[in-house]
Image (cartoon, grey):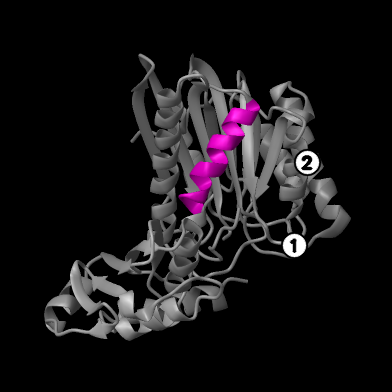
Amino acid sequence: MKTITTISGVYAGSVAAGIKPGRDDLAYIYVPNAVASAGVFTTNKFKAACVTYTQKLMKRHTVKAVIINAGNANAATGDVGIRNAKRTGSRAAKRLNIPATEVAVSSTGIIGVQLPIDKIEAGLDTLLANPYQVDGMAAANAIMTTDLVPKHAYAEAIIGNKRIQVAGIAKGSGMIEPNMATMLGFVVTNARLDRAQLATHLKAAVDDSFNQISVDSDTSTNDMVLAFATGDHDVSPHDPEAVAAFRRLLTTVCQDLAKAIARDGEGATKLIELNVAGAASRSDARKIGKSVINSPLVKTAIHGADPNWGRVAAAIGKTPDVKINPDKVTIRFASTTVFEAGAPIDFDRELVSDALRRSTVVIDITLGLGSGRAQLWGCDLTKGYIDINTDYS
C-alpha cells in the first residue's frame, strides 16, 4: 500500500514508549528538505497544549517534522502541558539536529491528564536514533486511539508534465465534527509551493473533506491537519489549470482520509454519504447537510435500515438561518425517491430497507432553490458508540 513514505524525502516511523501499554504509541514524520508547511487547527476554545504550541510555531516557521503521541491528549493541562509540549519538540529537534522551531507536536487521547514526559523523551531517543525510517504504515498505526483501522491515502497526477504526488495518514473515530474528534491528519506532497500557497490549498481541501464529516457532532480539543511540501516539482501559481489540478489532487486525498474516519466511527456499521443540491447558497447546503448528518434520529434510522424520510425532513427543517421551501424539497434513499416536491410518495419499503442494509448508504436531498450544493459523510449510531465511550477512561 502506498503511504506518506512512498514520496521521496519523507521519513516516518514509530515506537512503543509506554503511554498505551502493549503497542506503538509514539510516531514521527520528518521532511528534512521541506520548502513549505501549513496547518489547520481545531476551533474548540479548549485547545490542547500541542495545538497552541504548534499553531504559534507555524505562524513564523517552516516546520520539517512532527511528533505524534497516542494515549494522552495533553489538553486542559495548564502551564505544565505547554512545557511538556515544548520539551517534546526540543528533545526531537536535538535528535534530528534541527532547530526546535522546525518541530511540531501533536497528541491524541484522554483529556486532563499530564503527558508522561519522561516516557516520551526516552521514546524519542530510541525512535529518532535513526531518523530516516521509511515506515509510514507504522506511523499510521501508532497514532490510533479508538480507531479500528489505520487510515492512509495516496494519489498522483501529471501536472505541468510532472508527476505530482500527495499522500496522507490520519486518525479519528470518536469526538468527530472537525471545525477547522480527536482527529489528526498529516499530508505530504512532492510539489514546490510557498507557505501561503500551501496554506490556501490546505484550507480549501480541509473545508471540502474533514470539515464535511461527522461521527458524533463533537469538536475535539486536538483537531489538527498538517501539510508538508518537499519541493521536488513546481506547480506554477501562474497556471490556473495547474493550480486547479493540484487543488483537486490534495482534496481527493483529504476526502479519502475523511471518509475513512467516518466509516470507522466509534461503533459504526455503515458509512452515510449525504448529497445536498439546489440550496440557495453553498453555505446553506453545508449547514443543512450538517443538520442531517448529525441527527441522532437519522443516524439510528439508518442503523436500523428504516426508510423514515420524516427524520431527514425534520432535520432539514430545524436548520437555523437557511432558506427552505418545504414544497420544493425532494428526498432520496439509495437512488429511490421517498419524498417529492413537499409530499410523500409511494415506494417499495422493503426494497429501500434492503439498500439501507449496505455498508454505504447514500441520501440525496434536493431543495429546488438555487445552485448551492455540498457533500458530507457520517455514520450510523449504535450501542457500540455508548459502550466505547463509557469504557474510555
- Residue 196 counted in the magenta span: yes
First in sequence, mark 2 or 1: give its number: 1
Which residue is at a point 33% across and 69% down the rendered structure image? 269
Depth order, front residue of 228/277: 277
Quadrant containing the C terminus is: bottom right
Give the answer, above or below, for where 20 lies relative to 127.
below
Numbered disc 1: secondary structure: loop
Compared across the picture, whether 368 is left or right of 232 comes to left
User: Looking at the picture, which amino acid does disc 2 mark?
Assistant: Lys
Figure quadrant of residue 363? bottom left
Numbered disc 2: secondary structure: helix
Depth order, front residue of 288/260: 288
Compared across the picture, whether 215 is left or right of 40 comes to left
Give the answer, above or below, for where 119 lies relative to 327.
above
| Label 1 CA crowd tier, 10 Å (few <14, some 14–19, many 20+) | some
Which residue is at a point 44% across and 56% down the rendered structure image? 261
Residue where numbered disc 1 is placed: 46
- Residue 103 counted in the magenta span: no
User: Looking at the picture, which amino acid does disc 1 mark?
Assistant: Phe
- The percent coordinates of residue 344 (x first, y second) are 23, 85
Residue where numbered disc 2 is placed: 56
Give the answer, above or below, for where 235 lies relative to 24.
above
- The percent coordinates of residue 251 (x first, y second) are 43, 41
Q: Which mark is residue 319?
A: none
Give the answer, above or below, for where 64 lies relative to 187.
above
Q: Which residues are magenta?
A: 195-210
Tell me whether the residue at label 2 lies in contact with that at label 1, contact meaning CB atoms closer than 8 angstroms: no
- The percent coordinates of residue 323 (x first, y second) are 47, 71
Depth order, front residue of 157/371: 371
Look at the image and tell me whether residue 128 can be seen: no
